[in-house]
Amino acid sequence: MTAYPSSLPIASSKSLLPRQPPGHVQREPLQRRLLARDCRLRLLIAPAGFGKSVLLADCARACPPECSPLWLNCAGQSASPAEFCRQLSIALDYPPGLSETELLVAVQREPRALWIMLNDYAREPDDELDACLDRLLCASPANLCWWLGSRRRPACNLPRLLLEGELFELGGADLAFTADEVGAWLVHVDTLRCSRADQLFALTRGWPAALRLLAAHGEREGSPLCEEHNALLRDYIEHEVLHGLPAELHHALCQLAQIPRFNDELCEHLLGVGEGAAWLQALRARGLFIQEVEGAADWFEVFPPLAQLLQQRTRVAPCTSLHLHASQWFAAHGEARAAVEHALKGGQPEVAASFLERFTEEQLLQGQDLALILHWRSELPDSLLSSTPRLILLNAWALLLVGRLEEARACVDQLARFQPRADAERLAELFAQWQAIRGIAAYGRGHAAEARAHLLEALPALPQSAWAQSLLCRSILTQIAIGEGRLEQAQQLSHEVLKQARLCGSAVFEALLELDHALLLEARGEFARAEALLQRVLVQMDAQSLRRTPVHGRILLRLGRLALRQGCIGQAASQLQAGLEDALAGGDPGAFHGYLGLAELATCRRDLPAAFAQLAEAERWMQRQRVSDSLYRGVLLLASSRLWIYQGHHRRAREALTRVLGHRLETSVPPPNFPELFPRLEHLLLCLDMARGSDVREALQRLLEQAVAQGRQAFASELWSTYAEACSACADLPMADQARQAAHSLRQRLNYQGLWFAADELPLAATAEAPVPAEACLSCRELAVLRLIAQGLSNQEVAEQLFISLHTVKTHARRINGKLGVARRTQAVARAKALGLL
């Protein structure tokens, strides 16, 4: 039988409310929400230390004059219904000897406007007490408002109150401090720690008690929640959470704190059949920091800051057995990821390796858990990782998908140790997998012939069960065709592989292959169609399944690039940033294209330092991820060369461009996602030749004919513009006008607004190169432009005088400045006069 205390502390006026804690900050948004609601019951339900009492007291102090707050501190203790009614009668100034029935009648007739505030309601489940409270709530007239702060939810008819609009509830998520509130609070209590607000918030999840107790060590250095800082918090947990807890629940809470997530069935497996689930429900009923895992029905976790503290208490007694039992349970339920994690925590790498084999190729090739598998590679011995053909293949595919080509080749070559085998069918499959991996690695290195040979030989030999590998091989063949300019064949390959993906029922692979289709449309200059396609993919595909893979971020990055091509700068910036964050979070090498897009945006703003900084971040990211140079080096040097040319460093740009093209073989293919790399390198070199006064019309014409024949319309529009400039420089004005009109018409039809790394009116820095003599390098057209500039004409007026576009005038002006080694037009005029050109 439960023993009840003879009395409970009571306060019935504002003067007896609890004192405000040191460094108290009013939770004004929460107060406003509570005070604005007109309802019978306001509930504050949260575990210990979430500021329920402080908020209730603040609301009581803000009680309007026409109401009176009555404060009843229950101190977390249970009371019999009779004792509870007696204490309530005293608070209401009724005779203390009223029975419950008499109290209900008196409450129904109460004329005063009162706020009855029950602080720290009984912590232990008590059906009789809760039923009594429920009857009082039902009997209360509109002028009586109940406020209740509790660690647990009382067993009252709360759904009915909610349906009637008579209930307003705040939970732990509402009462936790936000990141901004942590910063504002530190300004009041510990200004020295303001710079660590984000760290404190991340470690405490806004738990007010943890924040306040950690602030007591504000004068010390070191990380919050380390051994030096959390002594007070540990004592608080001992007294406020663990003290008085039944031994079995104390044990269950400490055990569950070691497990990232759990449900009823897992608790039965770990804590005992017939007891585990009951203990979990008992902990939840008491409000002991067991919260639902977001987005996972029926799964729970111990509030992470508390879990960390409880884990520190058990470090002296490792939970090896607990983790091994959890590993077995997750493995039996097909959750290989959790099984591997717990096996590693249990100190059993051999068991972890055996569970790692259960990862399906479909999961891996879709990009799921790639970063995690690579992390496990660092924890497992090499001998285990290469102990079976399946583990070798799993690791080789993982390395391949993150761009570590040489490591993937070395890994898959270990399959040779397992040959010959008596099982001819299995041997053929292993060889086909080896060919598929070698073929994709060859494509990443730019070796088109080798890649195509391996992939075409692998496809017929891959069994039906390896449909994911088959789809990936066909995707690579499509990308090779796009890179080689065989766009019609790429269209056919893309259609066939998309059909196969749909037959396999893989939404993620379908989205991956739609990226190939969008790349094909982009190569043709059909930006609007490509954008509509990818937007449709985002809408139609299961958002959750995409978000668990790198596909979602890659689609956003591609959409950002397409928006940039169509001149939608704001949209491009938003999508590129969102896609970059997705890629960085998942460790995806595709983040490179996010940095590249942001560098292009900075170039559009004429902010060259920011553009160079983004390119440096792109290189740093790829090097940290150990991605093979061949997948990004050429694109990075092309982008850098554009910026160097804007700065006037022509020789440096020429050396970089020549170096990249010098490594190109006749059968080379450009890297993924940038199929125009090689023609763009050639185009930029021709622009440099033209800036030195060379006649590049014939070479440009060959490049233009190739682009037109391949269907690269957007790139062809750029080549037409350059060809027009080359003709103008050679005084071939009719052909220049014709080329200019072709470029304008094509660009307008394609809505090609954002040329690759283009920027108008970028000031040219004085080049460190020895300037070419002006008489030898200024073309006739450049001299004509310079003479009009010397007369004081604006760029627009020069364009009208010479019947050329404004863009062409600006281009000529930039080249004149670069050749004369100056930065501004006035300096160019002065320099030309000094040389006797004017």
Image: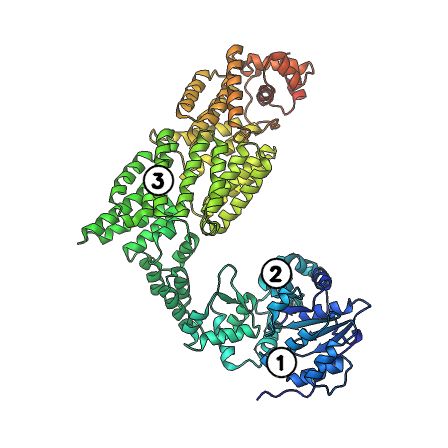
Q: Nearer the viewer, residue 664 or 530?
A: 530
The Cα–Cα distance between marks 3 and 2, rounded to whole angstroms, is 47 Å
Residue 580, given in percent of the width and then of the height, sits at 52, 45
- The 10 Å Cα crowd at callout 3, few under 14, some 14 to 19, many 20 or more, is many
Badge 2 element:
helix
The Cα–Cα distance between marks 3 and 1, rounded to whole angstroms, is 66 Å
Label 3, on which residue? Answer: 497
Residue 97, given in percent of the width and then of the height, sits at 73, 88
For marks 3 and 1, the one nearer the N-term is: 1
Q: Quadrant of the C terminus?
A: top right
Badge 1 element:
helix
Q: Quadrant of the N terminus?
A: bottom right
- The 10 Å Cα crowd at callout 2, few under 14, some 14 to 19, many 20 or more, is many
Amino acid bearing label 3 = Val
Residue 22 vs residue 3: left or right?
right
Q: Nearer the viewer, mark 3 or mark 1?
A: 1
The Cα–Cα distance between marks 2 and 1, rounded to whole angstroms, is 37 Å
